[in-house]
Image: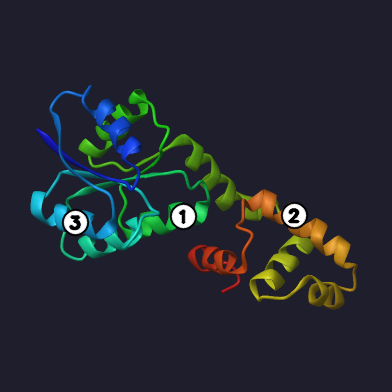
Amino acid sequence: MIKILLVDDHSILRQGLRFLIAQIPDTIVVAEAEDGRDALEKIRHYQPDMVFIDITMPKMNGIEVMRAIRKNDKDTNFIVMTMHSGVEYYQEAMEAGADAYLSKDITLEELLACMENLSHGRKYVAEFMREKVDKATSGLDSLTAREMEILRLLIEGKTNREIAEELFCSEKNVEKIKTNVRKKLDLPSSYGALLAWALRNKVFL
């Protein structure tokens, strides 16, 4: 029997997931938690085989919970259930110890595929995120020399005006190229998120 813990601050989402899991043989939901600290306590108490966990939660987020548990527990499977579609969230979750990354609007078929993969020691990533990851990792090769230069300056924290002055072009042209770069790489819009992306992907750092 596979013991499962559901962790999400929205009860309706926990109910929906519980309904799907009830249709899968040899599984049982042993407990639910609505915040990170509660999740931490229940993981240690129930020692579930699988934990379905959200990223954004009160008190402790899902990333912090996984990092805390992974210090001593390498066996529990963490399945991240989230509405976050940015590659940076996926990368942070996997680095924290996630075994699977799914959307909250998951179907029973995909849930079964995920659990089947985990039971054989394989990680599972939903198709919507696999496509984004492939785009982000392969997109660098599609950048022009000018786009690479602007990406480097963006990572350095330069403003549009500073980039325009350095490259002897207009701010309007800089903004246009920035938009192209972000689309090709599926980059986050904030500088903090961009820097985190660069660190994870070892780009110009």
What residue would you read off at disc 2?
A: 179
Number of the label disc, if any, that sits on residue 89: 1
Marks 3 and 1 sit apart, C-alpha to C-alpha, by 21 Å
| Horizontal side of residue 203 vs 64, given as left or right | right
Marks 3 and 2 sit apart, C-alpha to C-alpha, by 40 Å
Three-letter residue code for mark 1: Tyr
Occupied quadrant, residue 119: top left
Occupied quadrant, residue 166: bottom right
Give the mark nearer the N terminus: 3 vs 2: 3
Number of other residues with Cα within 10 Å of mark 2, as a class: few under 14, some 14 to 19, many 20 or more: some
Three-letter residue code for mark 2: Thr
Number of other residues with Cα within 10 Å of mark 1, as a class: few under 14, some 14 to 19, many 20 or more: some
Three-letter residue code for mark 3: Lys
Vertical placement of 68 versus 32: above or below? below
Vertical placement of 123 versus 187: above or below? above
What residue would you read off at disc 3?
A: 74
Instruction: Name the residue at 50% across, 57% down.
Output: 88
- Which image quarter holds the N terminus? top left
